[in-house]
Amino acid sequence: MMRRMAAVRTNLWLITALVFGVRTAGCASSEDDLSAQTNPDEQDAQTIPPVPVDGGSRPNGDATSDAYTQADERCSADGWCRVDMPNDRIALFGIWGSSKDDVWAVGSSGAVFHWNGTSWAAQRNLTDAGQPQPLFGIWGSGPKDVWAYSANEILHTDGWNDTQTVWSKVEVSRKIDTLPEAIRGIWGSSATDVWMLLGGTGMSGAGMSKCWHSYGWDGGTTQMTAALDLYKSASTGANFLGMWGTGPGDIWIVGENGRILHTDGYWGGMAEWTQPNSNTRSHLNAVWGTAPDDVWAAGEDGALRHWTYNEGGELHWGISDSTTTSVLRSIWGSSATDIWVVGDDDTILHGNGSTWSRSQAPSLPPGTPLYGVWGSGPDDVWIVGQRVILHRDGKAGTGGVQ
């Protein structure tokens, strides 16, 4: 939620799309298929199953589990607590918020969840044909400027509306010499400096990545121009997978086979990129940091790399021991000494800037993948994954949000 999700959004759906077309109306899956889903690249058209009568989320994702009681490992000793979901049979792939009272999560079967500081509400994103459309990530510059993306569409809304949140949509372009392009990520430094990452595969099988830049959403649409077009790799499917920056003059993208690119921003209608040595060949799924000289990248095989000064005073990507070999999928922190990383096998890591320790999660099904982490501060951190939302409010062992 599986290997690199399988590579956080492999090109498998791209090949399938070429032969059969992306699944839309008439390709609905069963609820059993939905509950078993762990790959965000799977283009499902399922109907979100009904919420359990008592609204509860069970440790094994089963609304009728006899093994569950209200006090049965609802919270871990480290203060992570399972939170009731509007529907507990979907996978959530991305999370972002503007404050502790405005948190968004998106995922399979078109799920769009919103936290208002008290509870989660749900809406569903649909295709033009009226089928649920999975969303793989979300970002915003504030509560009235929120961006999300499906496999091939970029979406925007002016904020949460409990009755009818309206999304505007733009379909990504396609090139003759590539298979359909997949959107990999969205990040921005402000409402008028937004970056979009895309990946595809050329007819030769080589990976082909693009990066677009937008000056924001205006008049129901957005104008996107190339900031990286195209980055070609000799490796099959070697695309970039994650993006983040400290500001308009410091943007990083990371991807498969340990590739990392950096730019000083989009100036004069262009962006210039450099490629430092990441000191890894593992796929990198996520990047985050606190300053231009304090950036972290996370990926497969437990790979963690830190952009910081070496003993000679030069900036480089240093190796950091994550203490795990699980696939790492998302990273976020409140400061340089309070960093969270999540991934497969219910992996939750906490870092102090130099060392990492494993944080205990509440009882989860074995191998549960965790896809996203975000917080508004050190005592308000959220994690989303396969049929689970976790929250930590800093009150270790006392339960947090119920």
Image (cartoon, helix red, strand yellow):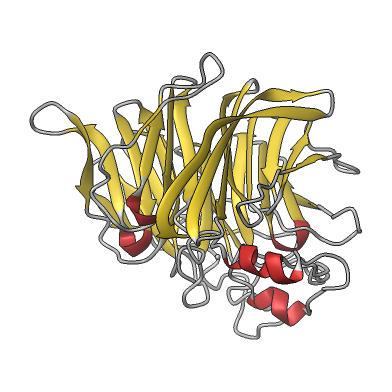
Name the residue located 71 percent from the left edge and 71 percent from the top edge: 19
Image coords of residue 120 (percent x, y)? 73, 50
Percent position (x, y) of residue 312? 8, 29
Which residue is rendered at x = 47% and y = 78% of the image?
366
User: What residue is rendered at 16% in x and 28% in y?
Assistant: 314
For the N terminus, the quadrant is bottom right
Residue 163 is drawn in which quadrant? top right
Q: What is the count of numbered marks? A: 0
Where does residue 168 sit, x and y in percent of width and height?
A: 82, 37
The extreme left residue here reads 312
Q: Specify whether residue 394 is in view.
A: no
Please determine whether, in this image, residue 216 is positioned above or below residue 319.
above
Q: Position of residue 13 (x, y in %)?
A: 63, 65
Front-most of residues 367 and 135: 135
Q: Which one is nearer the viewer's eye here, 85 or 299?
A: 299
- Residue at (27% x, 45% y) in the render: 278
Q: Is residue 87 visible?
A: yes
Quadrant hosting residue 324: bottom left
Looking at the image, is 390 positioned above or below residue 276?
Answer: below
Q: Residue furthest bottom?
A: 66
Q: Quadrant of the C terminus?
A: bottom right
- 138 relative to 368 in the view: left or right: right
Q: Is residue 315 left or right of residue 116?
A: left
